[in-house]
Image: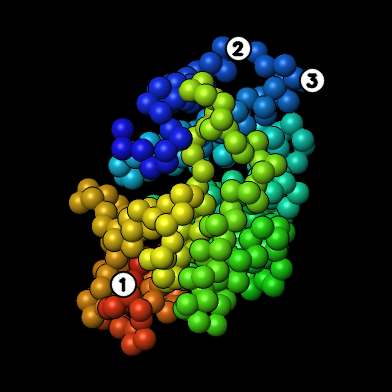
Amino acid sequence: MNRRQQFLTAAHYAFLSSYCDEEEGYWQFHPMQAESPEQEASLKARHIQSAFLSKLILLYTAGEPIDSMVPVLEKLIGKYELSQKALGYYEQSANISPLAIDDWLYQYEECVQVISLCVLLHRIDLLKRFVALLDAAGFAGTDTLYEDLLSHHLPDRQDVDGWYHAVYNHLIRAIYAATKDEASALLKQYCDEWYLAFEQAPWHNSHLDGDEGSYEGYWAFEAAAIAFLYGIDDSKIDHMVYPKDLVAYARGFTPAPESAQIARIEAGQPCTHTGYWFTPAQANSRRHFKQGESMPSVSDSSWGDALWYWAGEEKQ
């Protein structure tokens, strides 16, 4: 086990991985205390979804190959959809959000972590499905970070000057920093303060609970996604919670030959798919290209020749 955080032992990895794998099967045949069958179904769906999220984060913490996270992410998004449906049936509200991102900081963090993993693993199809659950509940256009994480890949996102939780001040300021050095410094400051900012979260200090505890890893995936999307220099960030090799994976992404995913394109090369593309080398770079069209370079890029990443199909 080539762990990415020192708190994870082989014994704990084996315990928690097995627990996550068995959670769905367990709740198919065991009751859960609840006030009604509808509430029970909702609680079970949330437990199962949470187990898949834990397994996804655990794989990264344990040092497993990043590609191994993709099938779990696919299943996780499906579990969010089932959880939202069960919650909506229980609450008699079809468009209810599966996460109360306006009220609960740890649920907002869960939201931006899932969005960020979809971005960093280049699964924009899954990103669209997950975000649809929150947009339908009225969260579209209500939070700056939420919108800034989506604007490169989803059309017609809104420019919002306000956000729910002050914890994200430094990260949001990094996006709009006047200089590249300031952006890097703000990103680093966000990572330095990240863990203490979530002291009220259910997972905080879970590494102290021993080999049969719930620790899965502490990761500021949203910091990595912002660094990738906005071309922020993270070379001086060496903090435990910053998933540096996940950013490297996103920047160097090349899909497997049998994959339906679309590879990045270097500046000067022909566009492989008609649709929208973006480059972290330039702000507000999302634009439309036709297949065969030459991808442009960016003269002031700090990353060398511009790399263009797939941002989605034609606007609907």
Spatial separation of the CA atoms under disc 2 and disc 1: 51 Å
Residue 37 location, quadrant? top right
Q: Residue at x 79, y 20 (%)?
A: 35
Q: Which residue is mark 2?
A: 30
- Asked if residue 244 lies left or right of residue 128, the reply is left
The answer to whether the residue labelled 3 contacts the one labelled 2, judged by CB atoms less than 8 Å apart, is no
| Quadrant housing the N terminus | top left
**Label 2 neighbourhood size at 10 Å, few (<14), some (14-19), many (20+)?**
few
Mark 1 / mark 3, whichever is N-terminal: 3
SS of the residue under disc 2: loop
Spatial separation of the CA atoms under disc 1 and disc 3: 54 Å
Closest to the camera, between mark 1 and mark 3, is 1
Q: Residue at x 52, y 76 (%)?
A: 182
Closest to the camera, between mark 2 and mark 1, is 1
Spatial separation of the CA atoms under disc 3 and disc 2: 16 Å
**Label 1 neighbourhood size at 10 Å, few (<14), some (14-19), many (20+)?**
many
x and y percent of residue 68 in the render?
33, 39
Q: Which residue is mark 3?
A: 35
> Identity of the amino acid at label 1?
Leu
Q: Residue at x 57, y 26 (%)?
A: 209
Mark 3 / mark 2, whichever is N-terminal: 2
281 w.r.t. 57: above or below: below
Q: Nearer the viewer, residue 73 or 261?
A: 73
> Identity of the amino acid at label 3?
Glu
Mark 2 / mark 1, whichever is N-terminal: 2
SS of the residue under disc 3: loop
Q: How is the image coloured?
A: rainbow
> Identity of the amino acid at label 2?
His
Q: Which residue is mark 1?
A: 307
| Residue 157 seen in this snapshot | no
Q: Residue at x 59, y 48 (%)?
A: 195
